[in-house]
Amino acid sequence: MGGDEATQQVRRRFNWRRWNNILHRDAGYLVAALTIAYGISGIAVNHVQDWNPNYRITKEILTIDPISSTARDAMIAEALRKISDADSLMSSFRPDAETLQLFFDKKMYTIDVPTGNVLMEVTRPRRVLYEMNQLHLNAPKRYWTYIADLFSLALIVVAITGLFVLKGKNGITGRGAWLTFIGLAVPVLYWVYHVYGG
């Protein structure tokens, strides 16, 4: 009896499942905001072939008088006067003899020199989503790298401790095992298909 009582006392002193659930709960709270942000950003950048997840680009057709200058610098100066843009010119490019492109901080003009037809493209960040994407892709570098690493470790902790939150038929020895297996099988089978059958 003495041995059984001592064992029960040890179990009462350290209930590993209780501490597992506490760790799972608190780590989950800590990473909730970043998990949502990374999830939204992940969906956005997954479809980069369909849209620009960082910037909204608006286009407008303008008309100016045809540009008469032929020398490059004179042509740029004349174009700047005619489009009357107050922004500082960053660079220019001539893809062909009849086209002049002027690049500003968040704006680009493509000018058809003989006709004076102008395509103006204005680029604006998609607020909030742009910031989420920058964090997700670790654009800030430096200290954010360590924060992102800690976040990744916290997700691992949440995933592992989550396996043992429930016990019984809904836990990892019952229904949870099947769901965990399905969660593992989906990426593994898709990767096999991608490598050998795609």
Image (tube, grey):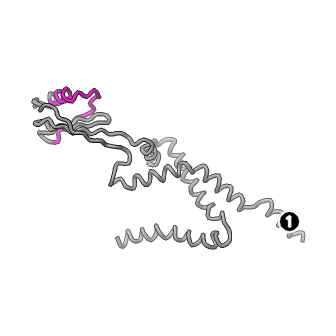
**Residue furthest right as drawn:** 2
- The quadrant holding residue 81 is top left
Residue 80 drawn in magenta = yes
Give the x, y percent position of residue 55.
36, 43
Taking the spot 87% from the left edge, 69% from the top edge, the residue there is 3
Q: Nearer the viewer, residue 166 or 192?
A: 166
- Could you tell me which secondary element the residue under label 1 belongs to? helix
Left of 132 or right of it: where is 65?
left
The residue beneath circle 1 is: 6
Residue 24 drawn in magenta = no
Give the x, y percent position of residue 37.
49, 49
Q: Is residue 97 above or below residue 14?
A: above
Mark 1 residue crowding within 10 angstroms, few (<14) / some (14–19) / many (20+): few
Q: Nearer the viewer, residue 145 or 41?
A: 41
- Start and end of the magenta stretch? 75-95
- The quadrant holding residue 49 is bottom left
Taking the spot 38% from the left edge, 41% from the top edge, the residue there is 125
Taking the spot 26% from the left edge, 30% from the top edge, the residue there is 89
Q: Quadrant of the N terminus?
A: bottom right
